[in-house]
């Protein structure tokens, strides 16, 4: 019966532990809960501790009590049942509730009365049942009441003792009474745990709290963390200091202590603590657990858009692109309205490009125009373009861009072809006196800008005698309406001052503003009449006076030119506004006994410290040519070309070197290379000229083969012709005009260079000694100059014809690899260079005119300039292309295969047409035999990688020529 009672208690006790698993205090034994069935042992059995049913504060309890205070020495034991220790628990708390009666309430009869009792413990690996031996117990504590009970009101004391260390499977507690009057109301044995918990989506197991302990947790389902989450369990059973955090996976969000799938229509893109978001605009509805919302058809995200962003559509084209000519010369405002579809994006930008197109092809405007602000990636709906030529039509394309424009199927660009459209005619900026007589004035004037090609201007010129003011007839002007920008006014009064002004009229006759009033004086009668008189003396006097006048004018103009020499404003090569007319004649520096005088007269000396050389850009006869900068005090730094005289020169070489400067220094024209000055008072003499960014014309053209449209080539030729007209007006004969001696600046303006007295004889690699001695560049030189050294402006015109051919053939060598001897023979037999490919017929006709054998039949530079101007004004005239025969125009005569033989290999053929750069491309495309070449079609050539229209044509024409076996050189003859 007793054993059964113990087992029953044990069962209850086990249940208790199990049930209280979730609590912070895990109870191993609770006397109160066990009620009357405690089954504790008492010793001695009859006396001492006994079980009592007690009412404490109105409640019924089973308690143990003892009160043996009269019978001398007491040793009463009360032992619990076997309390099993749980694994890992090394200490337990024992909480006792008890009442101790005050010994003084016992009439002083019991001297042995005590007011304390003792707590003992005994560990065991098995339940020993009733086998109770006091000697096996060790004392834990003496239990003393805080308050003893004196009257009827019981004073309940609570005392908690910690029992440790524990190591065996279980233990017994025992209470020893040594003569007190005690009621043990309850005894509770328990240990503490930190309960299992989920903190920041990490689950931590229930943990025994017997010392501060670090506990590792695991993330709940669908959550992860970078480092494993941890937390501390204190001895008091509290979780403290959580470390690390778990976060829900993409597509899941935190709901309480777990991660739940995003609902349909929501998404979460990343591992985070964020909640799922509603799918953004223009996306398809998502399913549950979505990590992103896919764009609806026709909508996109740019690679830089976050997956959380709305999807957007590519922009449509900008609208209403218009151009407005601005009042400042050469400027145009392009403006437009934003695209109809911006796609719902904020990053809309525009880019603008410019092309010049003819029917066949468009070329980028490049440096020829300037966008005043960056033409890419801008947000304004307008942009200003400047440096436009009023002669040209420009095609502008404005494109809208956004982060998703690459996905667009329709072009987001709009294009306009436009030209400067001035409502006002240009201004007459200056009037020049070209010639005068006693009764006539020859005048010409310049304009602030070129009128558009399709507009022919007229001019209104008003003049009156200045002395009319004296006669009070200031209102009577003679008015002339003129078609050209020059006039000769006749029937004037000799030796009289005239006041004169001019204005340009546009087509409809609307006037521009008048030029300022100029004064010109007719020459006195004597000036011309005396020349007719036979009186030698008078003639000599007048002659001397005229020479003096010329010298004075030369010096005055020279000085003025030096002073005026502004380099700020670009000069229009066609309508230059330089107030200075050319000097009537250039002065040969060799006329001076001391060439240094010529240098002093015509050239300004530069302080060598003002010059910094930067880079070698060429090699001339006398030494290296550098690009550098010149910084003259009080002026902006300018880029210059610096020609140097190499060390070890003779005095003669030095003078020859500097003679080029004394010649150049006399010229002032936008198409003649401008001399900045010389350095002579320094060991290394230098000639400093304006810097021409694109270098020599022949090289420039070779580098841009096929890339420049005809009318632009013509514009370049026009510049050269203007420079040559100026030189011929100055009575200067160049003798070595060739594309290699023309320089090109960044605006593609061409300027004639290479002036030197000995240059043809020594400086030019093309110079060839003739039978009469002296070097002559045969291919460029007129037959009479080769034959009997008759160099004239007409022979310069011949050379100009060759330059025209070089330009139209993109720097091709005239007469290819024919020998000089063969060239001279061919010329004398009336053969002439054939038309280059794609050369407008009118230009080729002009070349042929320049190559008239009879030099008197050749056009003068004035004529050439007029013809070129006319062609430029009327681009339609360039549409007729001269006959072109690939057999003579492309192949080198010696390798041309004109005898009917084929080229032996594809590389050999490509080299012969100067297209070697495509050798690898042909090989890669598997075109290895000439038979395959003959079978090539247009698109095949393009697929091989030939893209430039010029190259395409060259190759296609050559194949055409190869197919036609009946070649001859007949077209070479005029
Ligand atoms: P030259 O001695 O005048 O024939 O000059 C030799 C080379 O130097 C030329 O072919 C050009 O490449 C270069 N060069 C000469 N003068 C200039 C210049 N003013 N600007 C740029 N390059 C120049």
Image (cartoon, rainbow, N blue to C red):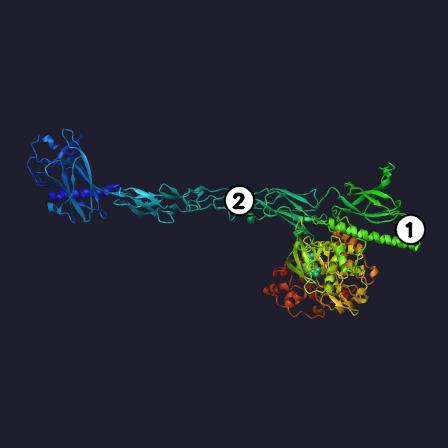
Quadrant holding ligand 1? bottom right
Work out how far the residue at label 1 is from the one at label 2, CA to CA, in angstroms: 88 Å
Element under disc 2: loop
Q: Which of marks 1 and 2 is in front?
A: 1
> Residue 798: which quarter of the image?
bottom right
Q: Where is residue 891 in the image (x, y as percent from the top left)?
A: 70, 66
Along the line of sight, the residue nearer the viewer: 438 or 546: 546
Q: Residues within 10 Å of mark 1 (few under 14, many from 20)?
A: few
Q: Where is residue 590 in the image (x, y as percent from the top left)?
A: 79, 61
Along the line of sight, the residue nearer the viewer: 561 or 880: 561
Horizontal placement of 831 versus 192: left or right?
Answer: right
Q: Which disc, if any, is residue 568?
A: none
Horizontal placement of 268 versus 894: left or right?
Answer: left
Q: Residue at x 90, y 48 (%)?
A: 525
Mark 2 lies on residue: 312
Q: Position of residue 275 (x, y in %)?
A: 42, 42
Horizontal placement of 829 versus 30: left or right?
Answer: right
Mark 1 lies on residue: 529
Residue 133 in sight: no
Horizontal placement of 821 versus 283: left or right?
Answer: right
Residue 778 in sight: yes
Along the line of sight, the residue nearer the viewer: 950 or 412: 950
- 383 up-or-down from 733: above or below: above
């Amino acid at each position: 019966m007793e054993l059964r009672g113990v087992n029953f208690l044990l069962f209850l006790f086990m249940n208790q532990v199990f049930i209280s698993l979730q609590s912070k205090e895990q109870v191993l034994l609770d006397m109160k809960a066990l009620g009357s069935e405690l089954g504790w042992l008492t010793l001695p059995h009859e006396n001492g501790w006994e079980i009592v049913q007690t009412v404490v504060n109105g409640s019924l309890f089973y308690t143990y009590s003892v009160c043996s205070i009269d019978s001398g020495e007491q040793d009463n034991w009360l032992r619990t049942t076997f309390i099993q220790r749980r694994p890992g628990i090394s200490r337990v708390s024992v909480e006792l509730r008890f009442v101790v009666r005050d010994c003084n309430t016992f009439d002083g009869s019991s001297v042995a009365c005590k007011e304390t009792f003792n707590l003992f413990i005994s560990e065991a690996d098995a339940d020993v049942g009733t086998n109770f031996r006091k000697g096996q117990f060790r004392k834990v504590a003496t239990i003393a009441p805080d308050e003893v009970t004196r009257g009827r009101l019981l004073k309940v004391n609570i005392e908690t003792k910690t029992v440790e260390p524990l190591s065996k499977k279980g233990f017994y507690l025992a209470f020893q009474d040594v003569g007190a009057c005690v009621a043990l109301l309850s005894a509770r044995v328990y240990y503490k745990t930190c309960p299992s918990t989920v903190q920041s989506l990490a689950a931590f197991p229930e943990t025994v709290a017997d010392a501060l302990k670090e506990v590792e947790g695991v993330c709940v389902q669908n959550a992860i963390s970078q480092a494993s989450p941890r937390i501390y369990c204190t001895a008091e059973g509290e979780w403290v200091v959580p470390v690390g955090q778990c976060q829900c996976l993409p597509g899941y969000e935190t709901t309480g202590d777990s991660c739940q799938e995003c609902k349909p229509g929501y998404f979460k893109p990343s591992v985070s603590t964020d909640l799922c978001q509603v799918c953004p605009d223009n996306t398809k509805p998502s399913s549950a657990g979505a990590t992103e919302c896919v764009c609806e058809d026709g909508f996109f995200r740019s690679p830089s858009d976050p997956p959380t962003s709305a999807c957007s559509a590519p922009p449509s084209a900008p609208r209403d692109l218009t151009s407005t000519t601005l009042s400042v010369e050469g400027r145009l405002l392009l403006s437009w309205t934003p695209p109809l579809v911006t796609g719902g994006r904020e990053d809309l930008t525009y880019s603008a490009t410019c092309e010049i197109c003819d029917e066949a092809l468009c070329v980028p405007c490049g440096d020829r125009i300037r966008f005043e602000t960056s033409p890419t990636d801008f947000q304004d709906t307008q942009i200003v373009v400047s440096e436009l030529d009023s002669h040209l039509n420009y095609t502008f394309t404005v494109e809208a861009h956004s982060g998703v424009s690459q996905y667009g199927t329709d072009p987001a660009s709009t294009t306009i072809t436009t030209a400067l459209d001035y409502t006002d005619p240009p201004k007459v900026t200056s009037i020049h006196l070209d010639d005068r007589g006693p009764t006539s004035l020859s005048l010409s004037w310049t304009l602030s800008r070129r009128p558009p090609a399709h507009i022919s201007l007229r001019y209104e010129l008003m003049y009156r005698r200045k002395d009319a003011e004296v006669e009070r007839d200031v209102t009577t002007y003679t008015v002339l309406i003129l078609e050209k920008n020059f006039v000769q006014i006749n029937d004037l009064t000799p030796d009289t001052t005239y006041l004169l002004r001019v204005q340009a009229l546009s087509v409809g006759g609307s006037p521009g503003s008048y030029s300022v009033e100029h004064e010109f004086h007719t020459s006195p009668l004597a000036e011309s009449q005396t020349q007719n008189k036979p009186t030698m003396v008078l003639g000599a006097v007048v002659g001397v006076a005229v020479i003096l006048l010329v010298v004075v004018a030369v010096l005055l103009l020279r000085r003025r030119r030096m002073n005026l020499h502004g380099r700020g404003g670009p000069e229009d090569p066609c309508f230059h506004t330089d107030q200075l007319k050319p000097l009537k004649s250039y002065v040969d520096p060799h006329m001076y006994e001391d060439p240094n005088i010529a240098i002093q007269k015509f050239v300004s000396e530069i302080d060598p410290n003002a010059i910094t050389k930067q880079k070698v850009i060429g090699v001339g006869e006398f030494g290296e040519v550098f690009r550098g900068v010149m910084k003259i005090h009080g002026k902006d730094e300018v880029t210059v070309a610096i020609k140097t005289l190499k060390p070890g020169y003779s005095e003669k070489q030095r003078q020859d070197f500097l003679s080029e400067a004394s010649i150049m220094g006399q010229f002032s024209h936008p198409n003649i290379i401008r001399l900045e000055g010389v350095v002579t008072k320094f060991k290394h003499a230098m000639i400093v000229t304006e810097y021409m960014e694109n270098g020599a014309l022949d090289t420039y053209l070779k580098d841009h083969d096929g890339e420049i449209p005809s009318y632009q080539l013509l514009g370049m030729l026009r510049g050269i012709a203007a420079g040559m007209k100026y030189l011929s007006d100055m009575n200067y004969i160049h003798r070595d005009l060739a594309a290699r001696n023309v320089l090109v600046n960044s605006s593609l303006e061409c300027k004639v260079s290479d002036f030197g007295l000995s240059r043809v004889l020594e400086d030019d690699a093309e110079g060839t000694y003739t039978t009469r001695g002296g070097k002559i560049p045969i291919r460029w030189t007129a037959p009479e100059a080769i034959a009997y050294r008759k160099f004239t402006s007409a022979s310069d015109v011949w050379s100009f014809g060759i330059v025209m051919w070089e330009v139209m053939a993109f720097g091709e060598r005239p007469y290819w690899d024919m020998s000089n001897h063969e060239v001279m023979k061919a010329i004398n037999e009336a053969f002439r260079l054939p038309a280059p490919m794609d050369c407008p017929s009118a230009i080729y006709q002009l070349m042929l005119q320049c190559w008239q054998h009879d030099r008197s039949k050749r056009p003068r530079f004035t004529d050439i300039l007029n013809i070129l101007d006319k062609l430029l004004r009327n681009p339609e005239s360039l549409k007729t292309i001269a006959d072109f025969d690939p057999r003579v125009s492309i192949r080198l005569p010696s390798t041309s295969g004109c005898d009917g033989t084929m080229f032996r290999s594809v590389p050999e053929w490509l080299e012969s047409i100067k297209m070697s750069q495509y050798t690898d491309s042909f090989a890669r495309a598997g075109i290895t035999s000439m038979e395959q070449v003959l079978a090539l079609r247009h698109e095949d050539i393009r697929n091989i990688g030939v893209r430039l229209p010029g190259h395409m044509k060259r190759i296609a024409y050559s194949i055409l020529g190869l197919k036609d076996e009946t070649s001859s050189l007949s077209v070479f003859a005029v």
